[in-house]
Image (cartoon, rainbow, N blue to C red):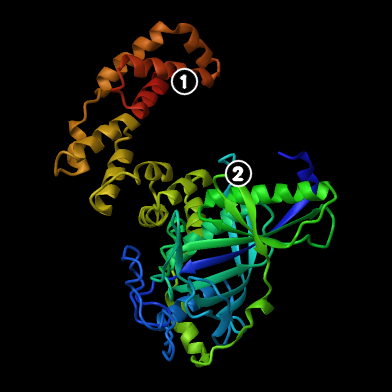
Amino acid sequence: MNTAIEKYEATIGLEIHVQLDTKSKMFCRCDNNSENAEPNTNVCPVCMGYPGVLPVMNEQAIDWGIKTAITLGCSINPMQRFDRKNYFYPDLPKGYQISQFFYPVGEKGNLKVDYLAGDRKTKKEFAVGITRIHLEEDAGKLVHAKDATLVDLNRCGTPLMEIVTEPDIKSPEEAKAFLQELQRVVRSLWVSRADMEKGHLRVDANVSVRPLGHDVLGSKVEVKNMNSFRFMEQALRYEIERQVDLLEKGERVEQETRGWDEKANATVSQRSKEGSVDYRYFPEPDLPSITIGKEKIDEVGADLPLLPSALRLKAEEFGLPYARVNELQDLDKLAEFASVMTENNNFDPILVANWLPKEFVGEKAFTDFVEVIMANKLSGSSAQKLYDLLAKTKKTPAELVGELKSLSEEDLGKIVKQVIDDNPEIVAKVKAGDDRVKGFLMGQIMAKSKGEAEPALAQDILNRILTE
């Protein structure tokens, strides 16, 4: 790593395209869920840009744009309008894209992010401003073969929601955490599958660096073609170091668009950066303006779910360490954890987190299982035996607990006494106030019982005999 990088600070803003999971496309009735269709079969005159055809707005896409904007704290524009963004590319048959430029769905929002740092222990927090959220249609797709480039127009007209952030992100680590949180948010709203590898979630980053303490931002470079969280983080790290190297040599950073080459592990120049003037925006003449009243905003915002950040906070309030909270989140079990703990607030949160990822037939079976473990103070090995028995029978956990092979209290007491008799020096230290060596005695007890002793019961018997 270039040590000079410590003398600079990075500024990152993201432009994220979220593919909406509506039934039909943005301005026509073509199926919006046909990823596996043969090329150029899921098309119609509207999305192929035939002369004389008229687009019709997808009301569900409008509602989902408003829902996302409300969730991200944006003010909703009471008047919204679509515009033509003119550019010429082989996968854009109309020669323009219908997008919201002048009057987007929402503006001036905010997303607070908390995430687990690289040490897997520390909780970090930051906030990112949302500049705007607007709706538009997607272009087609180019498929590069050995001797030719092919065009597939199936994706033309797919509804997209573009989310543009303020330049509030300070590191590739924060950029990754923000994008992962945004993915969780749109999935919790059920507006997108947001699968990055399938193109449902696409991100471009604007990156600049400047010496520490300087107020003026450096030249902005746009980085594209980042199709995974890992590649995005790698691309941003590379680009920051590249710009620092240029500045250290006394050279200028050119404002341009660069792509991430995952094979070369480097960003590569693609073209000079366009400005909005290059697209010659003007109002879309074939679509009327939309008036969004308070009733519509209230209706759309009435059924918002508990957001991922709120679920994480709730899990922490139940006593689950933040690192474990993130583990459950990665397994998509956080909402279930919150539900179980809310209904059974006497449950041990660690115990619930340990067993929740396992397969159970219904929530009742799981809660019965946890209740039996806690009531009988079962060890981890005994709980595993109980779980294995559940898979082989239709009996309940309470009916099966008696079938577990474990030592009786009388037999366990004999083992504890034998361990105490065999270790007089350790016992003397315990009686002198050194409780740290109790662990050695417990280890001996578990070894002599061949793992069949219940640790909680063994601990109770050991404490009782030592205080006699």
Q: Is residue 282 left or right of residue 199?
A: right
Q: Is residue 466 left or right of residue 172?
A: left
Q: Quadrant of the N terminus?
A: top right
Q: Position of residue 49 (x, y in %)?
A: 44, 82
Residue situated in front as seen by the camera: 182 or 339: 182
Residue farthest to the left? Answer: 394
Question: Residue at horizontal 38%, vertical 74%?
Answer: 22
Q: Residues within 10 Å of mark 2 (few under 14, many from 20)?
A: few
Residue situated in front as seen by the camera: 212 or 328: 212
Mark 1: secondary structure = helix
Q: Is residue 387 left or right of residue 328?
A: left
Question: What is the spatial separation of the Cα atoms under label 2 and label 1, in whole angstroms?
Answer: 29 Å
Find residue 439 and name its label: 1
Query: What amino acid type should be assigned to the residue bearing mark 1?
Result: Gly
Residue situated in front as seen by the camera: 429 or 254: 254
Find residue 122 and name its label: 2
Q: Position of residue 403 (x, y in %)?
A: 17, 32
Disc 2 vs disc 1: Cβ atoms closer than 8 Å? Answer: no
Q: Position of residue 430 (x, y in %)?
A: 51, 16
Determine whether 39 is above or below 289 in the image: above
Determine whether 128 is above or below 237 in the image: below
